[in-house]
Amino acid sequence: MGTEIMYRYNVCHIFDHTEEELLAMNNPFAFIVLAAQKALLQGKVPEEELGKHRLTVAKALIQSQKFSHKKIQELMLFLKSFLYIGNRKINSKFDEQIYQLTGKKITMGIIETIKQIEREEVFEKGIEEGIEKAKQDVIENLIIRLGLSDKQAADIAEVSVSFVKKVRASLKKKK
């Protein structure tokens, strides 16, 4: 039949650009590519050297003044977790240098930023789970107390019929 489908994707090779080219770009993705270049050194160079590379990227990011405070914090979080160094002393020194470099403008250290983002994610997840549980409770009441069909319960609670079916199945398991 001769039918054929071909997909072509644009490809960006991590080493297509030099460090200088990446630092000159106005794109936050350039810093991520630079971090990826440096991350490939993990296990090949001592952690102290890797820490220096991480600091170089961080300094360039902060000094570029190309991004908002929030974007810089997010990129710093990425940098700290992506270019992971297990040595606490090196990490502490990195945090101190960033603190000095920013003139204390970044009000939270990297660790505090990570913890805050984790707390926000947990909070959002808790809200989502709470909403899901509330929907489930409503559906259970519509099924048990009013004896509604899956479609009727879905329409009233504004959820999918498949969600109602899952709730109904869980009710049968409880019995």
Image (tube, rainbow, N blue to C red):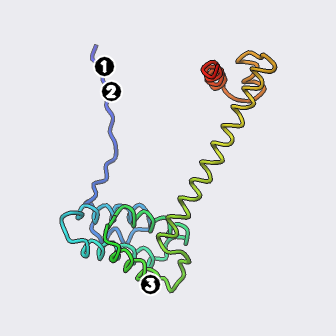
Residue mark closest to the camera, 3 vs 1: 3
116 vs 99, left or right, is right
Q: Give the amino acid at mark 3.
A: Leu
What amino acid is found at the position of numbered circle 2 in the picture? Ile
Q: Which residue does the image show at 29% across and 70% down from the upper left? A: 19
Work out whether residue 22 or residue 162 is closer to the camera in this orientation and state it: 162
At a point 77% along the width and 17% down the height, the residue shown is: 148
- Tell me which amino acid carries mark 1: Thr
What element does badge 2 sit on? loop
Q: CA distance from mark 1 to mark 2?
A: 7 Å
- Marks 3 and 1 in Cβ contact (< 8 Å): no
Element carrying mark 1 = loop
Residue pointed to by mark 2: 5
Please tell me how crowded label 1 is: few (under 14), some (14-19), or many (20+) other residues with Cα within 10 Å.
few
Residue 55 image-quadrant placement: bottom left
Where does residue 88 sit, x and y in percent of width and height? 35, 73
**156 and 136: which is toward the camera:** 136
The disc placed on residue 3 is: 1
Residue receiving disc 3: 101
Q: Is residue 102 above or below residue 167?
A: below
Q: Residue furthest left?
A: 44
Using the image as rendered, state which of residue 167 and residue 78 is in the foreground: 167
* Between 44 and 172, the one nearer to me in the picture: 172
